[in-house]
Amino acid sequence: MPMFVRRVLPWLLVGAVALFLASLVSAKTPSDATALNYTAFYQDLNAGKVRTATLSPQGQQTVAVKGQLTNGTKYTTTLLASPDLATQLKSHGVQTVNVQQPSQTPWWVSALGSILPVLLIVGLLFFMMQRAQGAGGGVMQFGRSRARLAGEERRRVTFEDVAGVDEEKEELQEVVDFLKHPKRYLELGARIP
């Protein structure tokens, strides 16, 4: 993997995660509207204090309602979903009732939300393994020994190998003779080579 990609890829991943988190936070920004509970909303509705209502489906069973009261106060609340909710609101004197269709997120956004965490984890593991291989061997090679066995494959030096070199041949004969008859050499003051 090129050095440029190794340096840039982690920063791209961090940037993607930051953008994803920023989009999550910005989607839930608080507004200046007053949050009404279920009971307070129906009390205001029965009293004729609700001027406008915008219905936004939230899943299968609930509807987010935003609007304005007759005194100008903006409100938000959550109601149970019902097919005749819009007509019920109009029958209680609400001047404007807007029903928004549920927003359909593109398929790629849903897929990205599922696949992105997996890709981030795999990318992080790959990055860590690449870093570990650069520092003294691979991660998966920690049990492999680099030691070699001394055995038959080692070549022995014989007299024929040094046949053309007289000095080495004489030294080797002296060592062999010393090993065969050590007492004779020890009496003369020789030491083990």
Image: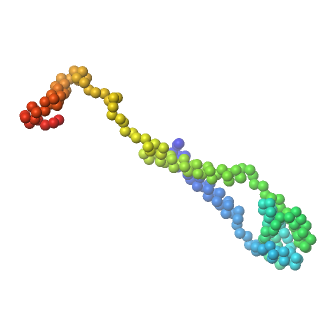
- Quadrant placement of the C terminus: top left
Location of residue 122 in the rendering, given as x and y in whole percent from the top left corner: 58, 48
Residue in the image at 9% along x and 31% along y: 184
Residue in the image at 56% along x and 53% along y: 11
- Choose between 168 and 76: the one closer to the eye: 168
Location of residue 106 in the rendering, given as x and y in whole percent from the top left corner: 75, 52
Q: Is residue 147 above or below residue 80?
A: above
Is residue 137 visible in the rendered image? The answer is no
Determine which quarter of the picture holds residue 183.
Answer: top left
Label count reads 0
- Choose between 155 and 78: the one closer to the eye: 155
Q: Is residue 117 left or right of residue 71?
A: left
Q: Is residue 152 above or below residue 60?
A: above
Residue in the image at 81% along x and 68% along y: 79
Location of residue 40 in the rendering, given as x and y in whole percent from the top left corner: 81, 76
Is residue 24 visible in the rendered image? The answer is yes
- Choose between 21 and 63: the one closer to the eye: 63
Q: Which residue sits furthest left?
A: 188
Residue in the image at 18% along x and 28% along y: 176
Location of residue 33 in the rendering, given as x and y in whole percent from the top left corner: 76, 72
Query: Which color scheme is applied?
Result: rainbow
Q: Is residue 3 left or right of residue 190?
A: right
Q: Is residue 171 left or right of residue 122?
A: left
Q: Is residue 45 above or below residue 25?
A: below
Q: Is residue 21 left or right of residue 3?
A: right
